């Protein structure tokens, strides 16, 4: 057993090296020494070589020839071929009196030693006897293309199958000699005259369609050969398709008489299609993707034909992709499908305007069009790639209301814009649906409204200027009066243009979006006369309103405000030798600070206004009402088509929301907040009474307002207990009333000063204007400071005495305004000897604040927000910019007003 194991182990050890040697030998057979080969292509092989697709090299042919593709060998023309699929073929040369068969597989003996047949002979092969003979084709026949049998002559040829070279074109023998045309494409050179002649002479329907197609393909030629041939017999040939409307008036007169569509109804169209060779391809219901080359969802594309929806889809496409999809043009004729009054389904051909057509066709409406033409640009042959492709880059379906005659415009028409581009180019293609309507007397009505409102605005500006002249005490016309008139006129005209623009927007918003059944109204076209006028009105309104606001701010900054301190010193004896008063100034500063706080006090909150408007427009979705369609869906689905925004409707919706929120805020403020919470204007009057400080405001030279704040208790700088006791006395009617006159609690007045009072007032202030404004600080030894202190005391004493009727030559009377004076806000009576204090129970002094100028501010904010939105088409950005403008403006006003008020009391501050 041990011996056997040793033998087996030896055999296994010896077998291992043998297997390894066999594997190495097989590897040498399968793998070449080097895996790199020369790069050789079929074009590198000579005429006596073929290209091996296995070895990727050129190999010599045994027969000495190669095939046309270069991948196999070939035999000479008169050799029989034995081809079993190998690149190398066996060639057998035919003898002198033999000819190779048509399939080149055998040699045939010629009959009567005639191996070449005549042109009118057909070859007859007898493969059983291997013979070959020529047979003359007679009796109206000729050899077929292969030449192996006779066939009937074409219908257009003579009985002998002969045709003159001048009459042969497109494989046909024309009845009349063909004409040579210049500047024609390859397609036209082959088939233009042939289709014309065959259509004209033989009424060939296919040829007539081909000729009609070539008329449409000739969109860029000013002298169309196809159109000239077409028009030469179009009126006399019933088989020639009508492709051109005869007259322009035919467009409107041939329209259906009972067209009408409900809101969001689908317009039904049918298209008939033909290929470039004149074959009828059938009818097709027009859907979203039939004529639209841009891709999208079916619902999105179908929205184009929803009546009343302005549609526009634009995309960028590669010309090569369009050509690959449509290598040969497809021609369309568009028909409107409708139901007649008798209930019959009818078709009306939609006129097509080709915007690129020049010459005679430029003013004619057609009935046929194409989308992509890749055959006109082919030059070498019809199988070659075109040098250019003609693409319909813009298709616009225009709907004109009213739909039914009488009308000078067709109810529906299609405008096509073509463009030539190379295969490597990319272009923008679009499909749009627009709606237009005769505006009738709209322009005239708008001009009349503008004229009437503008005249009223001018009259109102003249009245305001007249009132300003009276209040300023001016008698002559000067430069300041002209400036004031222009300022007043800008305000009144701003309101005029705003009313006109807002009225236009609201009218279209109601008239267009409010349609519930049959649609009879459509929006004005974009960038048309109506929209252009609207943008002009809105721009002018904003510009003039901005000027009015600037005038308001400048006027408020130039008002003269003086705080009259009625407080008397508690100690009648001067406190020191310098004669300084011991009356506290902090009451005056308190009133001045409160006046400063109410300068920008408004009846609405700008922040809440912006928040609510943005909430309604963006979150609730009211902005979607401004789209150019009849939908009122506030939250449309994500995949649905969103019509573009209308400039007019967008302004109407945004302005309405802004005004609605603002008016609601103002009504809430006046009716609820001021009655049940706080009225800061009346509280300011109460503060003046508690502080024993009156406010004298001069907005004009001789006109202003007076707030009587004189305390009925004589002193206001008292302890808390004394003040509470004084208030209790007033509540129990144990003290006089707060009013200027006895037994009256009226504290606010309009003031019309006499010329004498105004002169005295200016005389007291004159030293301040003459003194140089160089002294700063609180140095008591500064003479300028001493002059200011003296002037403050003088003015305070003068106004106090004037109000106490001390000066008999500068007295005043208190009276009520006439009703007409209150309505017109002007005074008819001039103060000659005595000044006039008009009773003012409505606190008209608030006109010097933002509080009573809410209308100006509200309209300016409305116009600012809307103008920014129309420029950016973004409500969020408009909100941000409006907020920034409001805050910056109010901050500047706050600081300016503070400086104005401080100017009235700094003389007193510096004395302490």
Image: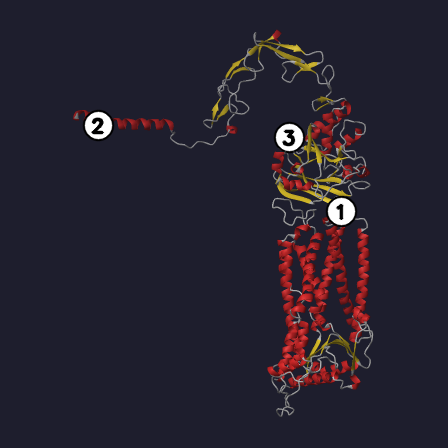
Mark 2 neighbour class, 10 Å CA radius: few under 14, some 14 to 19, many 20 or more: few
| Rendered location of residue 27, percent (x, y) | 35, 28
Residue at the limit of the structure toward the left, as seen here: 2
Residue 376, quarter of the rendered image: top right
**Disc 3 on helix, strand or loop?**
loop
Which mark sits nearer the N-terminus, 1 or 2?
2
Label ID, residue 521 = 1
Q: Position of residue 615 (x, y in %)?
A: 62, 56
Residue 226 versus residue 827: which sits nearer the camera?
Answer: 827
Does residue 659 lie above or below 676 as drawn?
above
Please tell me which residue is depicted at 51% across the width and 17% down the height of the picture: 83
5, 622: nearer the viewer: 622
Q: Secondary structure at mark 1?
A: loop
Query: Looking at the image, is mark 1 or mark 2 nearer the viewer?
Result: 1
The numbered mark at residue 250 is: none
Which residue is at the front of the view, 235 or 601? 601
Spatial CA distance of label 3 from label 2 is 81 Å
Mark 1 burial class by Cα count in 10 Å: few <14, some 14-19, many 20+: some
User: Which-is-in-front pick, marks 3 and 2?
Assistant: 2
Q: Residues within 10 Å of mark 3 (few under 14, many from 20)?
A: few
Residue under label 2: 9
Find the distance from the CA under tag 3 to the CA under tag 1.
Answer: 54 Å
Q: Is residue 333 above or below residue 140?
A: below
The disc, 3 or 2, on the residue closer to the chain's N-terminal end is 2
Lower position in the chain sequence, tag 3 or tag 1? 3
Tell me the residue that label 3 is attached to: 380
Q: Are marks 1 and 2 in contact (CB under 8 Å)?
A: no
Q: What quarter of the picture does the C terminus occupy? A: bottom right
Above or below residue 669? Residue 836 is: below
Q: Position of residue 453 (x, y in %)?
A: 80, 60
């Amino acid at each position: 057993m041990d011996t056997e194991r040793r033998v087996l182990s030896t055999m296994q050890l010896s077998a291992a090296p043998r297997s390894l040697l066999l594997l190495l030998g097989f590897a040498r057979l399968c793998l070449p020494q080097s895996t790199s080969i020369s790069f050789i292509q079929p074009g590198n092989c000579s005429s006596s070589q073929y290209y091996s697709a296995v070895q990727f090299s050129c190999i010599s042919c045994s027969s000495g020839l190669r095939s046309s593709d270069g991948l196999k060998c070939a035999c000479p023309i008169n050799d029989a071929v034995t081809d079993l699929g190998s690149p190398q073929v066996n060639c057998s040369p035919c003898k002198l009196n033999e000819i190779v068969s048509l399939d080149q597989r055998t040699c045939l003996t010629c009959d009567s030693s005639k191996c070449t047949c005549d042109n009118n002979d057909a070859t007859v092969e007898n493969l059983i006897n291997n013979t070959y003979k020529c047979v003359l084709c007679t009796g109206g026949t000729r050899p077929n293309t292969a030449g192996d049998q006779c066939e009937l002559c074409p219908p257009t040829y003579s009985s002998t199958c002969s045709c003159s070279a001048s009459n042969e074109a497109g494989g046909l023998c024309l009845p009349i000699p063909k004409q040579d045309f210049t500047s024609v494409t390859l397609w036209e050179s082959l088939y233009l005259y042939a289709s014309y002649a065959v259509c004209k002479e033989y009424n060939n329907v296919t040829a007539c369609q081909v000729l009609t197609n070539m008329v449409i393909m000739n969109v860029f030629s000013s002298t169309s050969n196809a159109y000239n041939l077409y028009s030469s017999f179009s009126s006399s040939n019933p088989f020639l398709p009508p492709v051109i409307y005869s007259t322009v008036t035919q467009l409107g007169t041939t329209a259906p008489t009972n067209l009408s569509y409900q809101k969001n109804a689908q317009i039904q169209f049918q298209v008939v299609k033909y290929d470039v060779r004149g074959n009828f391809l059938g009818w097709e219901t027009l859907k979203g993707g039939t004529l639209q080359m841009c891709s999208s969802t079916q619902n999105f594309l179908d929205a184009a034909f929803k009546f009343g929806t302005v549609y526009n889809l634009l995309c960028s496409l590669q010309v090569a992709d369009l050509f690959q999809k449509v290598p040969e043009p497809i021609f369309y004729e568009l028909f409107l499908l409708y139901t007649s009054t008798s209930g019959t389904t009818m078709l009306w051909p939609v006129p097509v305007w080709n915007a690129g057509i020049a010459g005679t066709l430029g003013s004619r409406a057609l009935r046929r069009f194409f989308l992509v033409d890749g055959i006109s640009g082919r030059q070498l042959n019809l199988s070659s790639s075109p040098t250019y492709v003609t693409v319909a880059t813009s298709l616009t379906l225009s709907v004109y209301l009213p739909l039914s005659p009488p009308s000078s415009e067709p109810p529906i028409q299609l405008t096509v814009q073509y463009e030539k581009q190379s295969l490597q180019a990319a272009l923008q293609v679009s499909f749009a649906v627009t709606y237009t309507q005769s505006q009738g007397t709209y322009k005239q009505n708008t001009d009349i409204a503008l004229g009437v409102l503008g005249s009223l605005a001018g009259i109102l500006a003249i009245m305001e200027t007249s009132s300003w002249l009276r209040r300023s005490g001016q008698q002559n016309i000067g430069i300041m009066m002209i400036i004031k008139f222009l300022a007043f006129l800008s305000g009144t005209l701003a309101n005029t243009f705003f009313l006109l623009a807002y009225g236009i927007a609201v009218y279209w918003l109601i008239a267009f979006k409010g349609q519930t059944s049959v649609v009879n109204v459509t929006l004005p076209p974009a960038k048309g006369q109506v929209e252009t006028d609207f943008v002009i009105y809105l721009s002018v309104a904003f510009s003039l309103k901005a000027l009015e606001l600037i005038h308001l701010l400048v006027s408020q900054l130039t008002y003269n405000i003086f705080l009259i301190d009625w407080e008397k010193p508690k100690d009648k004896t001067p406190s020191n030798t310098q004669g300084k008063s011991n009356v506290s100034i902090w009451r005056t500063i308190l009133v001045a600070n409160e006046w400063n706080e109410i300068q920008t006090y408004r009846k609405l909150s700008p922040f809440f206004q912006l928040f609510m408007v943005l909430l309604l427009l963006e979150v609730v979705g009211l902005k979607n009402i401004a789209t150019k369609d009849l939908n009122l869906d506030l939250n449309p689905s994500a995949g649905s088509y969103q019509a573009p925004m209308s400039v007019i409707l967008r302004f109407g919706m945004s302005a309405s929301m802004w005004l609605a929120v603002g008016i609601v805020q103002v009504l809430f403020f006046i009716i609820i907040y001021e009655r049940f919470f706080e009225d800061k204007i009346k509280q300011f009057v109460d503060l003046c009474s508690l502080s024993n400080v009156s406010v004298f405001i001069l907005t004009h030279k001789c006109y202003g307002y007076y707030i009587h704040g004189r305390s009925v208790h004589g002193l206001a700088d008292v302890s808390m207990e004394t003040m509470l006791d004084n208030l209790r006395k007033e509540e129990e009617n144990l003290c006089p009333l707060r009013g200027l006159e006895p037994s009256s609690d009226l504290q606010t007045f309009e003031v019309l000063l006499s010329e004498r009072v105004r002169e005295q007032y200016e005389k007291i202030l004159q030293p301040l204007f003459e003194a140089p404004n160089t002294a700063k600080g609180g140095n008591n030894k500064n003479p300028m400071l001493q002059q200011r202190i003296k002037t403050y005391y003088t003015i305070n004493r003068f106004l106090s005495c004037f109000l106490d009727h001390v000066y008999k030559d500068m007295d005043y009377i208190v009276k009520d305004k006439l009703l007409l004076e209150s309505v017109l806000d002007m005074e008819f009576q001039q103060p000659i000897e005595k000044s006039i204090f008009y009773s003012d129970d409505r606190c008209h002094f608030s006109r010097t604040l933002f509080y009573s100028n809410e209308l100006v501010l509200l309209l300016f904010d409305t116009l600012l927000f809307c103008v920014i939105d129309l420029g950016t088409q973004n409500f969020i950005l408009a909100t941000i910019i409006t907020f920034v403008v409001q805050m910056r403006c109010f901050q500047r006003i706050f600081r300016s007003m503070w400086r104005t008020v401080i100017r009235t009391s700094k003389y007193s501050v510096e004395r302490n």
